[in-house]
Each structure stands twice: as C-alpha cells, then as structure tokens.
Amino acid sequence: MKKYLCFIALCFLVCACSKDTPKPKEVELTKMVINENKIDLKPDLKTQLTILFTPENASNKDVIWSSSNEELASVSNTGVVTAHKLGRVIITAKNSKYNITTTSEVVISAVSMQGIQLNMEQLELLVGAEETLIAEVIPPNTTITTLLWTSSNEKIASVDQEGTVKGISPGETTIKVKSIDGKISATVKVTVQPIAVASITLNKSILNLKSGDSEKLISTVDPADATNTKVTWSSSDSKIATVSQDGTVKGINAGSAIITVKSGDGKISATAEVTVKVIAVASITLNKSILNLKSGDSEKLISTVNPADATNTKVTWSSSNSKIATVSQDGTVKGVNAGSAIITVKSGDGKTFATAEVTVLPTAVSGITINKNSLKILINDSRVLEITIYPQNADNKKVIWKSSNPSVATVSSDGSIKGIKLGSTIITATTVDGNFIVSSSIEVVSIDQFVQVYVKPNNLLASSAGNSVELSLGVYNPTNTPIEIRYIRIYIDGVLRQTYNTQDPELLNAFYRYSLGPFIIGYGAINVSSFLQDWVVEVEYFSDGKTYTTSSKVSGNTFGSVNINDFNLNIYTLARGLSRGVGIINLKTSIPLKL
C-alpha cells in the first residue's frame, strides 16, 4: 500500500514539472536549391550534390532524392549522382512536409578514344599456328571501346574480331586494329614461317622386281603438317627401273638402281634400292598340233608359256598362208579356203615358238537354182540367166552351160543366151561339184509375139457435119528391137472405113498421152462404147525387114497392164520407131455416128 502511494505522488510531481517547461518555436522551410543547376558527367563517374536551405535554421531539412532515368544516372539518398549511360537526366530533391522541390540537370557525355595500345609490335607465327593480340584503349574509361581487326593479306594471315591471328601461308602481312569510326588505329607486323620437312621415310628400302612388273613405294613426310608435303621421285638408272611421280617403280632390264624421293625444297630425301630380274621363256606348248576345219569355221588354239612366272608371257600369232587360214591374236584360227597352213605362236622376245598344222576341208555344193524356168527372146536378142549355188561358201562354184539346140539359141559360160533363129531349146547349167542341174526352156519368136495394141474410145465429137468419136490408140513394144508403124486402119463390121498413114502431118501433130490413168468413155448420158462394139483397129508395122499387123477391138476402158516406166516417147517415136515402150495417140475419125 505504501508503494502504491509513492507511485501516485511521483506521477503528480512529473505532471507539475511538464506544465512548467515551454516548447521551442518551429522554423518553417521556405526554399531549397541544389548547389549546381547543371552538371556534366562521364560514364561511371560520380558527383556529390548539396542543398542550400532557406532559412538555414529551418526545422525540417529532410529530402528525398530521385532520378528521371535510373538507367542513365542514379542518385543515392545522400545526393551522390552516378553516371551510367550517355544521355540527359533530371535529379530531383523533395521536402515532403512543405512540398518543396528543387532539380538539377545532369548531362552524361562520351569519353573520346585517344589511342590504342597493342601488347606487341611484331609477331612471328608458323603456318597453322594462332596467337591473340591484346589491345588497350586510351583512356581506359573511353565510352565507345568497340574495335575492328583486319589483315592486309588474308592469304598470309587471318585475324578474327577477338584479335586472334592465324598463320595461313609463308609471308608477311600487317594486322590492324582501329576504332569503329576509323580515326584511331594501331598495327602489328606479322611474319608467317613455313613448317619445314624434318624427314622422309619409305615403306621399303629394298625392292625386288621382275622385268615388266611394277610396285608402288609409299613415302611419309614428317611432320605431317609441314607446309610443303610434296615430293619428287627419280631413278639413278631408267634403263634398269623407272619411277613415276606417284612412287610406282617399274622393272625394265636386269640390274640395280637407286630410287630417290626428295622434299619439295630438295633438302630432305630418302632412298630405296631396286633389283630387277629377267625370267626368260623356256618353252611354249599348244593344246593341239593338228587342226582340221571347214571353210568358214573357227577354233581357238590355247598356248601355255613355261615357266608361268616368266617376265614376259605375251605371245604373238601368225599364219603361213592367210588365204588358207587366218589367226587372231587370241589364237582363234579360221578356215578360209581348202588347203593347209602352219599356225605359229612366238614368245614376246621372238626366241621361243610352237606350231600347229591346220587343214581346211573344201565345202561341197548342195544345190543350185535358176532365176527363169522359161523365157521368150527375139532373134539376135540377148538375155542373162542367173543361177544361185548353195551353200554360199561352197568352194567349187563352177558350172557347165549347155544349149540342147545351139542353132536356135546359144549360151556362154556366164549364162548369157542369144537367139539365133525361130524355134525352141533347153538351156542347162550343171555344177562341177555334185553334178546338180537346173534348166530353162527358151523360145525364139518373132516380134509380133510381143507387140500389143490397145484401143478405147475417148471423146464424142459433135459438129455441124455430124457426130464422130475420138479414139485412144496404144502400141506396146517390150523388146529392144525397134518397130516402125506405117498404117493404122479402122474396120466397122469387117469393112475398112478409114486409113491413117503415119507420114500424114495431121497424124504426126496428134496429141500424145504419157500416162495410163482411167479415161472417161462417155459423152453426157450417152455410153459411146455401146456404138463401137463392131469397130476394130489394125496397126501395120515394120521390123527386121518384115511387115507385121496387130489388131484390137474397141472395147474396155483401160490399156491393160503395161509398165508406166516405159512411157518415154516423143512426137515422132510412133512413126519413126518404137522400142521398149508404149506409144499412145488420139485419132479423130471422120466416120459419122448414128446416135
């Protein structure tokens, strides 16, 4: 209880004292200003801003600092400004109690590059080696530090954008590093040295070959990445052994030679000794020593060279008589004609050989045919009978020709027959080999057996004097003996009604036709041929001193089957002589027709 009373008394005492102590008077803040209105800063640099308060004894001087762009420049709560990137920033200080603010402009500007320092002035590299150059910009706080690297000769040395230089080929070049605007630069002289060949080794130091054989030597250059790994090859004696530029060694003649391989600069080399041996052919044998063939048949002889490992196993073939038998270079023998020949095979050096005797048997005749079984010819006319002997490769194709009646027609040794007089005979051909016989019946006839006359109506002619008809007359002579037409006569009902003399100018000027195409044999609706059934045209001609006549009725509408290739006549042919052809003439009759 006593303690409680003491506590109450103490409280009263404190309250009495508080009422007796007066509070200090607050000084109001009316203005504040940052000590610098505008500041220039470089990136990464700092500056301290301070505030001037009015009045200086203001009771509340608390401020809050802020930046309009923290990425460009930031400000601490004590007013320390730090520049980060190029640009313009407003720094603000604010007293929240009195709502008073003040600002300062901060401009962050670039630090220009003044120079570039490289870690070396010269650089030596081997081909394929790399080294990185180090470049430092001056001053260290340069704003734009981007650098560009180039080589004056990329074929000598290249450089990447990290400054790493690589040797490409022997020579000198300059590596340059410069600012992005190209105003500041620095250079390094680079010398690229080749990687020299240290040694060359061969897969063999001793090589044994037969003459004509080949083997390839393989060279190895050390180090493998030497700048020039090319090598050259040579032989100390090319009459013994040769070597190509790929290292292939070929034996030529018996003996020894040194094969040398050198580096591209000729400073390093390696050698191999080659020994060449010649193994001569001791003998050649054939699978057959006697060979029988028919003409046209073939058979291959097989040769064997001993010893089998002879240096030169090539052989050549020949025939003692190529008209009897031939031989190819693979040993194939072919029979040509009946008889005997010697086939020889020789070694490559010609010192060793073997022979075989080949006999070619004759090919017998098996039959004969003739191209004409029967034939008509004129006196003094010649024709050739053709025969075919089977088989075609028969050796003896001789035949004997004979005429059963030489007084009618004769025959020569080549089958040519000639008419002598009118009559018949049998021509035979008999083979000497096999006695095969063919024959042809030959008849020697007069020319009237060949000459034919064709007549047909062509056009109906109407005139004031009456009606007449135009006839087309064809005379066909397939022989080589010319005929001379002298008269043309027209008979009606057996009565001679009109005669034409071939010397008559009107006839000579008549129109000739040179084709056998179909003719129209009517006039309008009138069939003219119906009025000409009893008309007969007779032609009188002269040949070989005799006079002949041939006639034809006026009917039909073609000239028959005659060769169009025989139409080679001119205006005078019919009167002056006709042979191997057809003469066609149009005749205008003056005989009136009753329609």
Image (cartoon, rainbow, N blue to C red):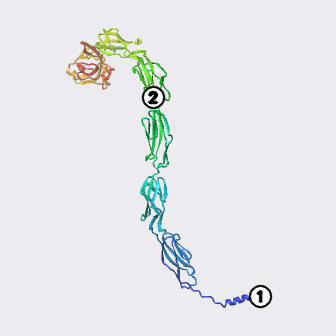
Report the residue at 48% width, 20% height from top.
Answer: 288
Q: Position of residue 110 (x, y in %)?
A: 46, 69
Q: Against 435, is 214 above or below? A: below
| Disc marking residue 314 | 2
- Which residue corresponds to the image point at 67% horizontal and 89% vertical from the top-left? 18
Image point 45% across, 65% down: which residue? Answer: 116
Compared to residue 177, the image places residue 77 above or below, namely: below
Q: Residues within 10 Å of mark 2 (few under 14, many from 20)?
A: few
> How many numbered marks appear?
2
Which mark is nearer the camera, 1 or 2?
2
Asked whether residue 215 is in view, the answer is yes
Residue flagged by tag 1: what amino acid is it?
Answer: Leu
Label 2 SS: loop
The amino acid marked with disc number 2 is: Lys
Whole-percent x, y for residue 142 in the image: 47, 68
Residue 47, numbered label: none
Can you name the residue that lies furthest to the right here?
Answer: 1
Sequence order check, earlier mark of 1 and 2: 1
Within 10 Å of disc 1 (Cα), the crowding (few <14, some 14-19, many 20+) is: few
Height in image: 157 above or below 588? below
Relative to the observer, which residue lies in front, 166 or 230? 230
Q: Position of residue 16 (x, y in %)?
A: 69, 90
Left or right: 322 as drawn, with respect to 586: right
Quarter of the picture holding the C terminus: top left
Task: Give the camera-side residue of 134 and 250.
Answer: 250
Q: Which mark is residue 5?
A: 1
